Image: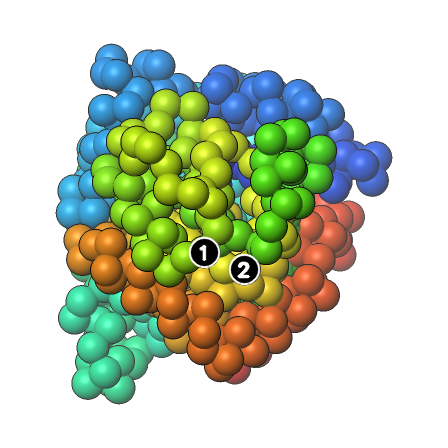
Amino acid sequence: MARFAFAAFGSLGDLYPLLTVARTLAQRGHDVRMITHTGHHERVVRAGLAAAPLRPDISDLDADPREVLRRAMDPWTGTDYVLRRMTLPWLRRTTEDVLAGAGAAEVLVAGTLVFGAATVAERLRIPLVPVALQPVTMMSGWDPGVTAPFDWPPVRALAPWPGRVLWGGMRLLGDALLGDLRRLRREWGLRGATRAFLTFPPDAPLVLALFSRHLAAPQPDWPPTAIATGFPFHDEDGDAGLDLALRAFLERGEPPVAFTLGSSAVWVPGDFHVLAAGASARLGVRAVMLVGDEPGPLPDPLPAGVHVAAYAPHAALFARSRAIVHQAGIGTTAQALRSGRPAVLVPYSHDQPDNAARVARIGAGVVVPRPRLTESALAAALDRALRDPAIHDAAARIGAAIRAEDGAATAADALERLAAGRSQPVPVAT
């Protein structure tokens, strides 16, 4: 038996992949602890794992949670807000929490926003396994993402140099903001500077890319110990999570279009649900809209054939749907791809535009940028997704390939090899 500590910072989309891998290890008899925000602890305990606190929780931010999420999801300033208000001011406390929560762990596994993870691992003298949940966080010069101008064809043709300039500049800017971490390292008696912003420790014995190579292929400049495991799916509720009203709606007509904004953008939907209902009525299709516990504006009355639910398990709903309209968060994207259904992607912020562009690039969906979203634009994109046989074929083919992967088991196997001292560098496929 080995002892693992997992540190997950962020939304449910950040928690669930790590929680799934952690649960897989626990089911194999290992001692596993999840270090995460107290608001996630109920889910951790329900998965059968021990939980340790990680600051900040959303209640620590001295603002209305809806306003926090609205600012965090802003397409222009959201990333800056997450760093300057939700992450960097808490860096010392977050790092201290990871140290306390790791305890006697033999391996520390940490998400992208746990900037002090390498420092904790160094102090405990245990290996750090960094995790990348989204392709863009692999920080490849060969595949830098869709941030303009680096997504323009003439610039992409010069790869990897434009991407290296992008990531190098962002690292220098970010490293300048990590003063609290440098001071903490000195207090802990650690020498040298551990670059922790948008980079992987050069001596990381294993890097887990917890997504499918069918969404983003490994690149020549990935760390040599990186493994694209496939998505680790967290299917907590299964079919039982479909409430009676939703189940009855699904059973009395043709499969609907599913509309969802995931676990974060659902708090700041704007007019998304009004436009979704209007587009569905315009096309004459049945629809299920997942609107969260505090929905924003909804059409009154709802068009015929439109059902509203606060929540439903994505895996169960998507399997019963004709198409999926979503915000392109990585967790929702994974579930939509696994379903094999065509998608319309309406990205809000952060990694979502890049995830959406990748789905369109592999032919499995159509993108409507959030600033350009209108009822007519959404209806046109959805009509194309429903009618285009090429999109249907690509979605079905990729869905079958993703369902054949077992991301949680692959990641757990690699972590077991590392804990047993048998880890070997994994060559990157090119």
Q: Residue at x 45, y 62 (%)?
A: 343
* Relative image position of residue 163 (x, y in whole percent): 26, 70
Mark 1 is on which residue type? Val
The tag earlier along the polypeptide, 2 or 1, is 1
Q: Residue at x 41, y 57 (%)?
A: 284
Disc 1 marks which residue? 285
Q: How is the image coloured?
A: rainbow
Mark seen at residue 322: 2
Q: Residue at x 35, y 45 (%)?
A: 277
In the image: residue 403, left or right of residue 184: right
* Relative image position of residue 243 (x, y in whole percent): 63, 30
Q: Is residue 48 visible?
A: yes
Q: Secondary structure at mark 2?
A: loop
Q: Residues within 10 Å of mark 1 (few under 14, many from 20)?
A: some
* Relative image position of residue 178 (x, y in whole percent): 25, 37
Question: Against 295, is 228 above or below?
Answer: below
Mark 2 is on which residue type? Arg
Q: Decide: marks 2, 1 in contact (CB < 8 A)?
A: yes
Q: Secondary structure at mark 1?
A: loop
